[in-house]
Amino acid sequence: MTLAEAIFLTVITASTPLLLAAIGELVVERSGVLNLGVEGMMIMGAASGVAVAIVTGSSVLGVVAAIGAGMAMAALFALLTLGLATNQVAAGLSLTIFGLGLSGVVGAPFVGMQRAGIAKIEVPFLSELPLIGPILFRQDPFVYGSVALVAGVAWFLWRTKAGLVLRACGENPVSAHALGYPVLRIRFAAVLFGGACAGLAGAYLSLVLTPFWTAGMTAGRGWIALAIVVFASWLPWRAMLGAYLFGGLIILQLHAQTAGVRVPSQLLAALPYLLTIVALTVIMALRRGGGQVAPQALGRPFVPDR
Amino acid sequence: MTLSRRNVLAGASALAASTALPMAARANDPLGVGFVLIGPVGDFGWSTMHDVGRRRMEEVLGDAVTTTQVEAVAPPDFDRVVTTLARAGTRLIFTTSFSYFQPTLRMAEQFPDVMFENATGTATRDNLAIYNARFYEGRYIQGVIAALKSQTKQIGYVAAFPVPEVIHAINTVMRGAWSVDPEMRIRVVWANAWFNPGVEADAARALIDQGCDVLCQHTDSPAPLQLAEERGIHGFGQASDMTRFAPNAHLTSSINNWGDYYAARAQAMIDGTWAPADTWGGLDSGMFQLAPFTNLDPEQASHAERVVAGLRDGSIDPFAGPIVNQAGEEVIAEGESLDDDAIRSMNYFYQGIDVSMPG
């Protein structure tokens, strides 16, 4: 395997959990809900996934459990923000703190245990092709799943009536409600989907990337996913680009260090975050004259007048 | 009742009598011992082994001690955590990271009645002791074994922060490697974290992709070793025996053994003999041990055992001169050796190590 192939493969590995979490949060925010609890849902997915996988001996059940845990956390958030119309920012932050603590309790019995990671899917013959073979045809199911998810979300949001309704709930929930659409139920479904994606991202961390449980293993990836959604201007394919760009920068700064680039490692490590800030600034500056970038009702509670 | 001198004295006497009994009882209460950990107990490395040490202390001293442990304490939270422990009556506090050394100095001043012990610190105070193990002896052995195993002549090192402990470890690994093969080279990735499995795994991938076929780590998760297993190369565990994480890749681990030290220091507190000490134990002290050598052929294992024996009896000195730094300046001449203070404050790489100092 050439160095270029190896770097590409590592970039994909580093980017996949970011993409999974970001695409879920993108749908949530498109519906007008801001869930800052991605990190909490993600780590609960990681803890539950590895716990169930170890207990049952099945990685598939582990993934299902991770999705379920993410959705359960999301349902709690939805209960607070949609059912009780509490502040979404406060509820999201609380969800992250709660998730980090609860995951430690859930994962405690499984500290020190490990299991084999989920195997890669190798497409016969095609995986042997130079350069593109290993990158496109020798990946784990999560990688293929994440790309399919992006395509599915893009199609849903822009090519279906249901997607249009969901976006309407994020832009003008009052009008959507006046037209007879159940805004809160639609938002609830979106929040659950976001939780499922975050749980799936967590499962990737504890079942593929580093196949064991340890407290705090998400290490801020949930926050990066939130930044990617903004970076992507709430567009699915751009979110994919953002996730791969961010993952690429993380990996390239490590390779720059190994290659002996004479730049402080702290600066190299900060580079992905600095470039995100620059990108966000540029996007906002370019869009300033052209109307709203974010869904207009993002973060605002909606209480239908009954 | 009118307030008179007699009434005040009588009241004071009654108060003194009422508090005397609890004070006497308090002297026989278990000693409150606190532990502040830099990582989670489940890091499988540094913090895991401090927790093992704490439990060993409890086992040895039984009801004579009661322990409170706070894990994954970020340095900005340190003061708050220690203040809480001190105010709760904890009389001996172990702060288990170099990242806590400066804050521990500050807290020791603030709570003169509490005794502090900092792992890997560099100075003592009236109520502050420091303790460490000479892990560099293990690093020297790792360098020797790495040179015996490597085909590419490249060692990969997942480093945490550019602090003296990590710098002298990298230097010592290379000194050990050069004792076998002077052509050995090292590549370093700074993870800028003591514990972050995802970053550690990515760092290991980068090192392997760049041609390193033996990995050393100064971070605490088994992720780099697992990557070594996955990619068919070799590596060393950190702080605990990590054989089970990589049965085919693992060569050895330095195993931190703090339990007996913790028990002795707590017993000294109970006996009233605690004094600020500077403890730095080597292989012969039992403060760290080597996991059994694995995945070495008999000749390689025998070579490694000879090096272990040499370190134990002092015939091998990892810091014997001549030592020349990257700038070409002689740090210490032939026939001399760096003293402990010079090792502890090391802020340079040896000549031949093509690694830039971050920051």
Image (cartoon, coloured by chain):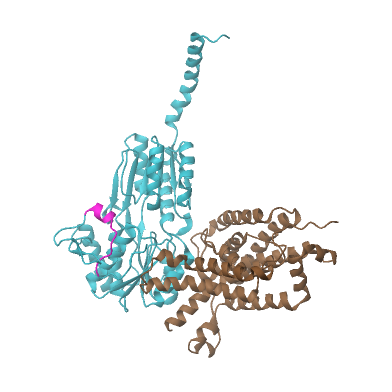
Q: Any magenta on residue B343?
A: yes
Pick the front one: B322 or B178: B322
Q: Which chain is brown?
A: A
* Residue B102 image offset from top left, x and y in percent: 38, 47
Q: Is residue A62 left or right of residue B68?
A: right
At x 58%, y 67%, the residue is A280
Depth order, front residue of A44/A274? A274
- Image position of A93 with respect to A115: above or below: above
Q: Is residue B234 above or below residue A299?
A: below
Q: Position of residue B161 (x, y in %)?
A: 38, 60
- The residue range painted magenta reads B339-351
Tell which chain the image draws in cyan.
Answer: B
The image quadrant where one finds the N terminus of chain A is bottom left
Residue A144 in the image: above or below residue A220: below
The structure residue drawn at horizontal position 47% and vertical position 15%, both measured from the top left corner, is B13
Residue B153 is drawn in which quadrant?
bottom left
Q: Where in the figure is residue A113, as x and y percent of width and height?
A: 50, 63
